[in-house]
Image: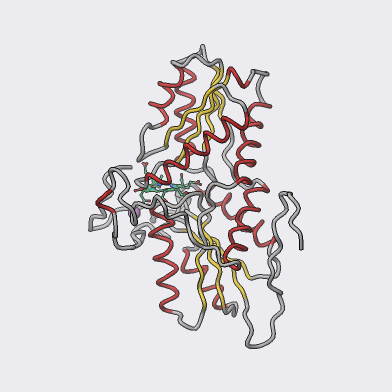
Amino acid sequence: MTHAPTDEPAPLAISPVVAPGEERLGVMICGHGSRDEAAVTEFNRLAAHLRARLPEHAVESGFLEFARPIIRDGLDALKAAGVTRILAVPGMLFAAGHVKNDLPWEVNSFAAANPDLTVDFGRELGIDPKLLKAARARIEEAEAAAAAVDRADTLLMVVGRGTNDPDANGNISKVARMLWEGMGFGWAEVSFSGVAAPLVDAGLRHAVRLGYRRIIVFPYFLFTGVLVRRIYDWADAAAAAHPEVEILKAPYLNDHPLVIDSVVDRVADILAGETAMNCQLCKYREQVIGFEGAVGAAQAGHHHHVRGVGTDGDHGHHGHDHGHDHGHSRP
Ligand SMILES: C[C@@]1(CC(=O)O)c2cc3[nH]c(cc4nc(cc5[nH]c(cc(n2)[C@H]1CCC(=O)O)[C@@](C)(CC(=O)O)[C@@H]5CCC(=O)O)C(CC(=O)O)=C4CCC(=O)O)c(CCC(=O)O)c3CC(=O)O
Ligand SMILES: [Co+2]
């Protein structure tokens, strides 16, 4: 088979119908989860697209935090459906604590309790040409909804989640650079919704001083939620404080067809044996500047206290309080 240069995903090479004793595949997409019901709805829509795209496999989904079903529920459902091998993929953009620690803990715990099943864990969505194209489409939607302004007079502000993992944070800079260079903006900056600096408010204070006519605030996020709403509020506050600059809010990635394609690609990668993250700059393996103490840290999930506790749409499940400390020092 030749590979034409298109955005069409490579078809999975496993046949749906299997004889007794053969492999029966199940796909598990692991989402982040949110207190925000709209975020849960959007993730579930992505999972529904994935199910439609992989009709030959059982497909289940679950959430790491807040929302139900939790990841264990999805894995249990695949087992109950009679699969013999589970391909679990992160529905997450980058490899930071959730992809390097929390999801492996969930998947490994299930695998240890179910030695009769083969359980494989794929890699994060990562920096991917398809996701960059989806990002471009979201930025172009914001431009199309406003008056024409030259990209040379526009500053692109790419907003990442922000983590304690410098490699994941650095990926936001790379995404920003590739969109800047590929789309011809006058300038690009990065900022974060929390944990990493600069936060969006500080980033925008800086950006308005660079003198561009327009700033496009683009959350490099999969779905809406507490954090995307906070980012848009920061953009509104900057717009109110700086009427001399036009500040546009671009949509986040959501269920763009190329996002669905990249999830399908990550599933296909597992079957091709390509499950390794890029570990070259991993703070747990290498002495990354400023993070030397993280080398060799134990891989442990820590989301038991928010796992499945519910969303704001539930009543009586709001608590994140628990009697022991996880060392969450910053938001
Ligand atoms: C609002 C909040 C939940 C609440 O309390 O309601 C929330 C929400 C969301 N996070 C999302 C994504 C990620 N969160 C992380 C990491 C952390 N997130 C944490 C807290 C909170 N996250 C609460 C904010 C508290 C506050 O700021 O006031 C930390 C501190 C604690 C912890 O989770 O353990 C931990 C610190 C990082 C560290 O220590 O390194 C990573 C990075 C990683 O992998 O680690 C990713 C990217 C994954 C990827 O790459 O895709 C998404 C989906 C976004 C999307 O759709 O794209 C939502 C949904 C939403 O916005 O609602
Ligand atoms: Co936690």
Residue 283 percent across, percent down from the top left? 34, 51
The quarter of the picture where residue 20 lies is: bottom right
96 on left or right of 6: left
| Quadrant in which the C terminus is drawn | top left
Could you tell me which residue is drawn at 46 percent across and 16 percent down? 210
State the residue in front, 95 or 178: 178
Outermost residue on the bottom side: it is 20
| Quadrant in which the N terminus is drawn | bottom right
Residue 108 percent across, percent down from the top left? 42, 70
| Ligand 2 falls in quadrant | bottom left
Q: Is residue 70 above or below residue 149?
A: below
Could you tell me which residue is drawn at 46 percent across and 68 percent down? 72
Could you tell me which residue is drawn at 56 percent across and 52 percent down? 43
235 on left or right of 250: left
Q: Is residue 60 above or below residue 293?
A: below
The quarter of the picture where residue 135 lies is: top right
State the residue in front, 117 or 78: 117
Q: How many marks?
A: 0
30 on left or right of 17: left
Residue 70 percent across, percent down from the top left? 47, 63
Q: Is residue 285 above or below residue 200?
A: below
2 on left or right of 20: right
